[in-house]
Structures are given as structure tokens and as C-alpha cells.
Amino acid sequence: MATADLRAQYEAEVAALQALAAGMLGAGDSEEQVARWTVAQRNALKQRFRAHTPADELARLQAWTRARYGNPLGPSADQLHAAGKSWRQIIEGAARPGRYRGKS
């Protein structure tokens, strides 16, 4: 699958996390529980899609993420919360695809 197609599919699946998280909140789960779940789901999506990413693009992506967050997957829910994000902000951020940093 082409990188652009992978990215579009990834973005759609990340965006779908918002509705799932809203359902969990509506069912009575705490914001903290939902934030942790949403970050875990986002990380699982990252791993699944990165398995199909060309090696050179994957290396570049992981290097950028490691330099910014200290690990190749990105910040944990705890890191985000410690940095001052509310659990609600963490949910919203985990369900919003980041800016694509593909080759220019």
C-alpha cells in the first residue's frame, strides 16, 4: 500500500477513537481511564501502521519521535498529564492525527 494510502487509513482510524472515547465517557468511565485507553489505542495503531511503512521512512519517523518525546512511539498518558495536560485534553490529542512529516 502506498504511503499516502497508509496515512489516510491511519488518520481515519485515529479520528475514530474520538467517538469510541465519547462512548466510554458516556457509559461512565472516568476521564483518566479513557485517556489511558485512548493513548494505548493510538500507540497500537502507530505500531500496526509502522509495520507497513517503508524502512527508510520508518527510521526517519522514529528518529524524529525519539528526539521529541524520548521514545519511538511518543509520550505516554502519564508524561502528558505531568506536562500539564488534562485527561480530557489527552483524549482529544490522542484522537487527533498529528501533522504528517513525510518527505518534502
Image: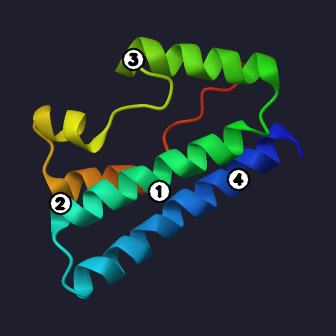
User: CB atoms at circles 3 and 1 under 8 Å apart?
Assistant: no
Q: Where 46 sits versus 82, above or below? A: below
Instruction: Reply above or below: 41 against 29.
Output: above
Q: Name the residue under label 3.
A: 68
Crowding at mark 1 (Cα within 10 Å: few <14, some 14-19, many 20+): some
Please determine whether, in this image, residue 95 is positioned above or below residue 57. below
Residue furthest to the bottom = 27
Q: Mark 4 or mark 1: which is in front?
A: 1
Q: In this view, does 85 lie to the left or right of 10?
A: left
Q: Name the residue under label 2.
A: 32
Image quarter where the C terminus lies is top right
Give the Cα distance between marks 1 and 2: 14 Å
| Image quadrant in which you'd find residue 29 | bottom left
- What residue lies at 59% left-to-right and 62% top-to-bottom? 13
Q: Residues within 10 Å of mark 2 (few under 14, many from 20)?
A: some
Q: How far apart are marks 4 and 3 (CA)?
A: 23 Å
Q: Mark 4 points at which residue?
A: 8
Disc 2 to disc 4, C-alpha distance: 28 Å
The amino acid at mark 1 is: Gln
- Residue 89 horizontal/vertical position (percent): 22, 53
